[in-house]
């Protein structure tokens, strides 16, 4: 639908019939993620549909669509149901991730990545308060892709800000080290750059679609 306020709902267009004339396993990555390890396992993982488990409410069977793999072209009913019942669905579900998780669960194929593969920056990388004021963020062991959700965004984290005017959430010099000499920047797979207002990460793997 036109003029949809939450841009996350636009991800559902990935489920359009014959989307881009693509087929087969497809890995989707948000732009505000940082790849810190080999992501071959994301293609090799035994699942028809795999997604990050929501880190904010882990007790719920809801995925975080920052990183997910699916069979492109196989589930056009997900988009059609949304467009046909758009007002009802947006009242029932808070965001696209909840609706998508519900529909995939109905098919019996919802599966989450292992928790250590896609850690949350603010929940798993930043030390707990007050240690966050004098300890730099770290890459958890066995991490593949670090996800950012809510605030901060990667550019905010680089300068030690919480984002959206939230002030400092950790020692500013410590967080600046993410882009200079901390363990995150030392990681051999870390590739990031700021491009205007956005953030991007890159990979040489096929069938990866980036969404800002």
Image (tube, rainbow, N blue to C red):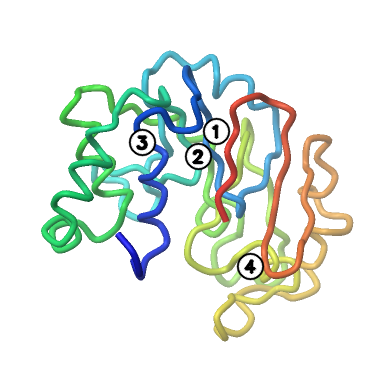
Callout 4 crowding tier (Cα within 10 Å): few <14, some 14–19, many ≥20: some
180 lies above or below 146: below
Label 2 crowd (10 A; few <14 / some 14-19 / many >=20)? many
Q: Which mark sits nearer the N-terminus, 3 or 1?
A: 3
Q: Are marks 3 and 1 in contact (CB under 8 Å)?
A: no
Q: CA distance from mark 3 to mark 4?
A: 40 Å
Q: Earlier in the sequence, mark 1 or mark 4?
A: 1
In this rendered view, identify the residue nearer to me: 94 or 116.
94
Spatial separation of the CA atoms under disc 1 and disc 2: 10 Å
Q: Which mark is residue 62?
A: none
| Count of numbered marks | 4
Asked which secondary structure carries label 4, the reply is helix
- In this picture, is 83 found above or below 172? above
Residue, disc 2: 67
Q: Name the residue at 68% across, 25% down.
A: 205
In the drawing, what numbered circle is on residue 117? 1
Q: Nearer the viewer, residue 73 or 66?
A: 73
Give the residue at mark 4: 132
* Residue drawn at x 60%, y 54% as measured from the top left: 32
């Amino acid at each position: 639908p036109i003029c949809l306020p939450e841009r996350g709902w636009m991800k559902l267009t990935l489920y359009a019939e014959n989307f881009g004339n693509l087929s087969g396993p497809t890995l989707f990555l948000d732009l505000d993620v940082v790849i810190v390890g080999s992501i071959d396992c994301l293609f090799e993982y035994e699942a028809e549909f795999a997604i990050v488990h929501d880190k904010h409410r882990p007790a719920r069977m809801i995925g975080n669509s920052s990183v997910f793999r699916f069979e492109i072209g196989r589930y056009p009913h997900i988009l059609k149901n949304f467009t046909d019942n758009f007002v009802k669905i947006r009242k029932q579900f808070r965001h696209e991730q909840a609706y998508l998780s519900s529909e995939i669960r109905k098919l019996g194929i919802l599966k989450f990545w292992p928790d250590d593969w896609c850690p949350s920056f603010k929940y798993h990388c930043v030390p707990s308060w007050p240690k966050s004021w004098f300890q730099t963020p770290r890459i958890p062991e066995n991490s593949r892709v670090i996800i950012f959700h809510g605030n901060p965004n990667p550019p905010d984290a680089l300068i030690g800000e919480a984002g959206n005017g939230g002030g400092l959430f950790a020692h500013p010099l410590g967080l600046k080290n993410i882009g200079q000499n901390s363990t995150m920047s030392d990681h051999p797979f870390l590739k990031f750059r700021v491009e205007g207002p956005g953030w991007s990460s890159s990979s040489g793997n096929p069938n990866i679609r980036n969404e800002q």
